[in-house]
Image (cartoon, rainbow, N blue to C red):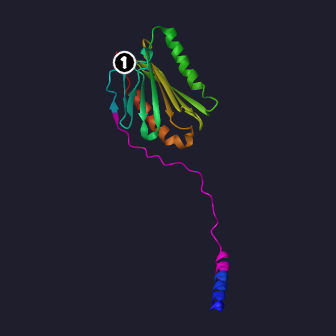
Amino acid sequence: MMKSIKIIALSSVWLMMIWACQPKEVYMPKQRGYYRMVIPDTGYQLLSKEYPYSFEYSQYAYIDDYDLHDSAQYWINVAYPQLNAVIYISYHNFHGDSALNVMINDSRSMVFKQISKADDVIESVIKDDSANVYGKTYEIKGNEAACPFQMWMTDKKKHFFRASLYFGCKPNNDSLQPAIDYISKDIMHMINTFKWNN
């Protein structure tokens, strides 16, 4: 009996040594990846509340308006919960060219505060004489740019509208690029359907 236990033990050790010497697959670490974003097809809806402006926005977003105080009246957020993104919109009623110039300069300075993180800023002009809408868009390129898209519009008389896109995560625009492209397209649709209501 003792002899058979020794034979079984030696056989087990011998089998384990043979198995240990077999060639194994080489472990290769997986490359770092990002979650796949599911981007829905876009449909649009008209901003239904009474504001001094109107536009069409994505049916996958919702409007969150916040009246902090009288100076922030008609400020809204266009929120994209599936993409963890928000377009922050501010509105000002102004009087005189000097007030308009201050708001335009403030908007430009907010864009160019990101220069240290940006690779490039692509500036485009908005001009629609029939709708009395004038302004600029700023597409901010760069992996660490906190706000990849900003814009402002005015009628040059009393209305000033500003929008900026932010994501609720640390900037990494390589992984966010599909969402940035999707929402940038929505912002362009917003601009193309934009109207002043009074």
Q: Is residue 41 magenta?
A: yes
Residue at horizontal 47%, vertical 21%? 135
- The local crowd at label 1, few if under 14, some if 14 to 19, many if 20 or more residues have their Cα within 10 Å, is some
189 or 177: which is nearer to us? Answer: 177
6 or 102: which is nearer to us? Answer: 6
Q: Does 127 sit above or below residue 56?
A: above
Q: Secondary structure at mark 1?
A: loop
- On the image, which quarter does residue 57 sit in? top left
Find disc 1 in the rendering and name its residue: 52
Q: Does 128 sit above or below residue 188?
A: above
Residue range in magenta is 15-44
Point out the image quarter for the N terminus.
Answer: bottom right
- On the image, which quarter does residue 46 sit in? top left
Horizontally, residue 21 falls left or right of residue 106, namely right
Query: What amino acid is labelled 1 in the image?
Result: Pro
- On the image, the x and y values in percent for residue 19 come to 64, 77
- On the image, which quarter does residue 47 sit in? top left
66 or 12: which is nearer to us? Answer: 12
Report the magenta stretch's main SS: loop
- On the image, the x and y values in percent for residue 151 come to 49, 25
Residue at horizontal 45%, vertical 39%? 182
Horizontally, residue 55 falls left or right of residue 103, namely left
Residue at horizontal 49%, vertical 13%? 100
- On the image, the x and y values in percent for residue 140 come to 56, 32
Residue at horizontal 55%, vertical 17%? 105
- On the image, the x and y values in percent for residue 5 come to 63, 87
Looking at the image, which residue sits at the far front?
2
Point out the image quarter for the C terminus.
Answer: top left
Horizontally, residue 23 falls left or right of residue 131, namely right
